[in-house]
């Protein structure tokens, strides 16, 4: 039996999902529609267990609806305007735009590694 290496296995499937555009929306008028939207993330830091808990629940819902034949729109966005992002920039002494864009890139990578089915 070969060793289980989750990072390699996850990467393999995530690459296949990306190549197949598995989570992109394709409209089929014969199928019912389902819209799954969780809270937008504040890009004032990195993803933590609170983010993951929330987004995994939405991901389970979106995947279940896909398996049941729904057209699923599962988008993601950023709540980048406001006090959390501004305070994070002040705390690190980084310009707000630089801080926010850097945190978005980092969190996006974290969420992609989780394999969440965002369109």
Image: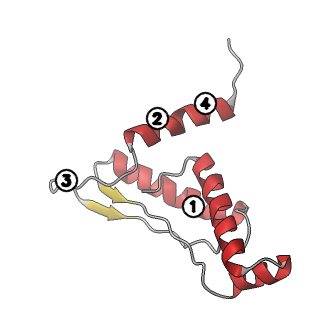
Q: In this view, does 51 lie above or below 28?
A: below
> Residue 9 bears which disc, if any?
4
Determine the secondary structure under disc 2: helix
Q: Alpha-carbon distance for marks 4 and 2?
A: 11 Å
Label 3 SS? loop
What is the spatial separation of the Cα atoms under label 4 and label 3, in whole angstroms? 31 Å
Residue 52 in view of the camera:
no
Which residue is denoted by mark 1 in the rendering?
55
Could you tell me which secondary element the residue under label 1 belongs to?
helix
Q: Are marks 2 and 1 in contact (CB under 8 Å)?
A: no
Can residue 110 be seen by looking at this rendering? yes
Q: Residue 23 carries which label?
A: none
Going from N to C along the chain, the mark reached first, 4 or 1, is 4
Crowding near the residue tagged with mark 4, few <14, some 14–19, many ≥20 C-alpha atoms within 10 Å: few
Question: Could you tell me residue 4's position as x and y percent?
Answer: 69, 24
Pointer 3: residues within 10 angstroms few (<14), some, or many (20+)? few
Q: Residue furthest top?
A: 1
Q: Identify the residue shown where x is 63% and y is 61%.
A: 105
Give the labeled residue for mark 3. 28
The mark nearer the N terminus, 4 or 3, is 4
Which residue is rendered at x = 57% and y = 78% of the image?
79
Question: If you read the primary sequence from the N terminus, does the residue marked by circle 4 or circle 2 appear first?
Answer: 4
Give x and y (percent) for residue 94.
79, 77
Q: Distance between the residues labelled 3 and 1?
A: 26 Å
- The residue singled out by tag 2 in the image is 16
**Gap between marks 2 and 1 measured at Cα:** 21 Å
Number of the front mark, 4 or 2: 2
Query: Could you tell which of marks 3 and 1 lies nearer the N-terminus?
Result: 3
Q: Which mark is first along the chain, 3 or 2?
A: 2
C-alpha span from label 4 to label 1: 21 Å
Tell me, yes or no, whether the two marked residues, 3 and 1, touch with CB atoms within 8 Å: no
CA separation, marks 2 and 3?
A: 23 Å
């Amino acid at each position: 039996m070969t060793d289980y290496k989750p990072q390699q296995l996850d990467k393999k499937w995530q690459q296949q999902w990306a190549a197949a555009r598995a989570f992109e929306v394709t409209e089929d008028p014969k199928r019912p529609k389902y819209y799954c939207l969780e809270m937008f993330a504040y890009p004032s830091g990195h993803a933590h267990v609170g983010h993951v808990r929330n987004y995994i629940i939405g991901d389970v819902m979106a995947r279940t609806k896909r398996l049941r034949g729904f057209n699923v729109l599962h988008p993601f966005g950023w709540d980048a305007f406001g006090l959390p992002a501004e305070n994070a920039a002040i705390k690190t002494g980084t310009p707000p735009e630089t801080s926010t864009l850097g945190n978005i890139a980092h969190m996006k990578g974290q969420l992609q590694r989780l394999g969440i089915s965002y369109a």
